[in-house]
Image (tube, rainbow, N blue to C red):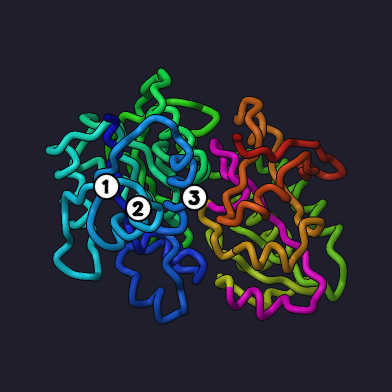
Amino acid sequence: MFRLGVIINPVAGIGGQVALKGSDGMLAEALARGAVPRANERARLALQPLLALSRPFEVVTVAGEMGERLVTELGLSHTIIYRPAAPQTTPEDTRAAARRMLETGVDLLLFAGGDGTARDICAEVGERLHVLGIPAGCKIHSGVYGVTPQASGRVAARMIEGELLSLMEGEVMDIDEAAFREGRVRARHYGQLKVPGDLRYVQAVKQGGRESEELVLEEIAAEIVEQMVPDTLYLMGSGGTVAACMAHLGLENSLLGVDLVENGRLIGQDLGAREILTRIQGRRCQLIVTLIGGQGHLFGRGNQQLSPEVIRAVGLDNIQIVASKRKLALLDGRPLLVDTGDEALDRALCGYRRIITGYRDQVIYPVANPQ
């Protein structure tokens, strides 16, 4: 019988919606700001496709919030192989659980977390287990995750049903969170995991570095600024292309956060989801976003402040996407991706969308999550 290992980092991603840009060492601060854990719900989306499988399988998991609660709710047959010492779990619990998975032997280890969780898993199992991540963290640079939780579940389902999937080496990357909060990205390679390969479902490693096409960025910025309407709020998403728009306005930019601009003035900086909702309620608002280079994600990677509630409050017709043609070309024809955590909203965001690629220059490009 197929043995599926399940490990959930229950606090993964908890800092995202409250603009902390990470969860490592920030749990108390995140909770104080009103953050709500969501890793178990992300894992639920991944495990639900498994409920309809005809082939039997066994889940091997961790006690409490690290897996047991969810698989029990879903009615999945399971065995507990590790129990955390305290209700508040730690990275060491993740590592210890991964060690037990390796000792016990599982056919696929499915884990929910972010890059920090991937590091912990990699440190214990290396390339000795087949591993796949469920994206639940704030920052997901590693190439070991499904493009959405549902995609991770579909890959797991295909393995359980006995389909032949190639194995590929997924790179585990993580960044210095302290530098990240100061607007600097310092990524480091921590190893590789053996990931079941399906390029429709498994994301690429995020490409680092700043956009080098300075003239193109200036043209994009000029187009955005020229289109700005008086007495309208502009939510400026994260990333270097949006930062170029802020520089054109002469405004300070939180490169990895979300800022608020009105009438050419910076009126809010590095805002969390709750504050954004309060500030834009009842106002005309536009959202300026770009995609993550190499992966193609618009929402759900590093910009969880743009929550489903925020996106709906802005309105789908008021989202402006900016990117250079080179950035789009590097996707090699793959569509843009959305992973907001709200399936209905993800479906609504799919389709062909206009992307501003220069001054008076646009292209049409698909947003299409894998089915």
Q: Looking at the picture, tell me which residue is in the foreground, 62 or 11.
A: 62
Q: Is residue 294 magenta?
A: yes
Measured in 3D between alpha carbons, the distance from the residue under mark 3 to the one under mark 2, in whole angstroms, is 12 Å
Measured in 3D between alpha carbons, the distance from the residue under mark 2 to the one under mark 1, in whole angstroms, is 7 Å
Within 10 Å of disc 1 (Cα), the crowding (few <14, some 14-19, many 20+) is many
The residue where tag 1 is placed is 78
Do we see residue 154 in this rendering? Answer: yes
Give the residue at x 66% y 34%: 335
Q: Are marks 3 and 1 in contact (CB under 8 Å)?
A: no
The amino acid beneath tag 2 is: Val
The quadrant of the image that shows the N terminus is top left
- State the extent of the magenta-drawn residues as a range: 274-300
Q: Are marks 2 and 1 in contact (CB under 8 Å)?
A: yes
Mark sitting on residue 342: none
Give the residue at x 61% y 42%: 337
**Element type at mark 2:** helix
The amino acid beneath tag 1 is: His
The residue where tag 2 is placed is 71
Residue 108 percent location from the top left of the image: 30, 34
The residue where tag 3 is placed is 45
Residue 175 percent location from the top left of the image: 37, 51
